[in-house]
Image (cartoon, helix red, strand yellow):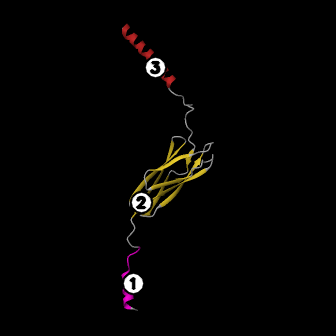
Amino acid sequence: MKKGTLLIICGLLSMGVLQAQSTLITPKSTDQTAKEDNLQLKESSYSFGKIPQGRPVTHVFEIVNTGKTPLLLENVRASCGCTTPEWGKEPIAAGATAPIKVGYNAYAEGHFNKTVTIFYNNGQTKTLVITGEVYKLPPTSAPENASVQFLKQTNL
């Protein structure tokens, strides 16, 4: 019985020591190294709906610097070559807005879902999404009307 009691006491003491140690190692929630997220998106996705094949489309996304210091976009990268982002290289002043123009080359027929990633503040990211459906255009603008040909032949 004394051996069992001694084991229980040793176990409880070691658990207390481990808990005290983990409390010392665990960082506090007031970590000074946490980065402030000062980039706000007015919209994070856009659907082009149905668009004709071979006709590029664009959409302008607006971003807002909600911080107190200027914000510099480090890079804006598309998920594939059919999507092209354009953005300003100048810092965005505190409280100011800036556009990111996203173009899509509607070459491939069918549904698309593409992403554009914004890199800012030394490692932070936000993602924009564009979607839509590309349909194939008919080979001619409209089928020829047979009745018009008939009227031309009869010379009425």
Q: Secondary structure at mark 3?
A: helix
The reply to whether discs 2 and 1 touch (Cβ–Cβ < 8 Å) is: no
| The C terminus sits in image quarter | bottom left
Q: Percent from the top left, x then y, of residue 59?
A: 51, 57
Q: Residue at x 51, y 22 (%)?
A: 24
Q: Percent from the top left, x then y, of residue 127?
A: 49, 48
Please give the residue where the numbered disc 2 appears in the rendered image: 133
In this view, 136 is above or below 23: below
Q: Residue at x 45, y 64 (%)?
A: 55
Q: Percent from the top left, x then y, of residue 14?
A: 44, 16
Q: Which residues are magenta?
A: 141-154
Q: Which mark is residue 75?
A: none
Q: CA separation, marks 2 and 3?
A: 58 Å
Check the image and name the residue furthest to the front: 89
Q: Where on the picture, by quarter, is residue 34?
A: top right
Q: Where on the picture, by quarter, is residue 50?
A: bottom left
Please give the residue where the numbered disc 1 appears in the rendered image: 148
The front one of 47 and 115 is: 115
Relative to 29, 115 lies left or right: left
The reply to whether discs 2 and 3 touch (Cβ–Cβ < 8 Å) is: no
Please give the residue where the numbered disc 3 appears in the rendered image: 18
Relative to 88, 151 lies left or right: left
Q: Earlier in the sequence, mark 3 or mark 1?
A: 3
Amino acid, disc 3: Leu
Q: Secondary structure at mark 1?
A: helix
Q: Secondary structure at mark 2?
A: strand
Q: CA separation, marks 3 and 1?
A: 93 Å
Amino acid, disc 2: Glu
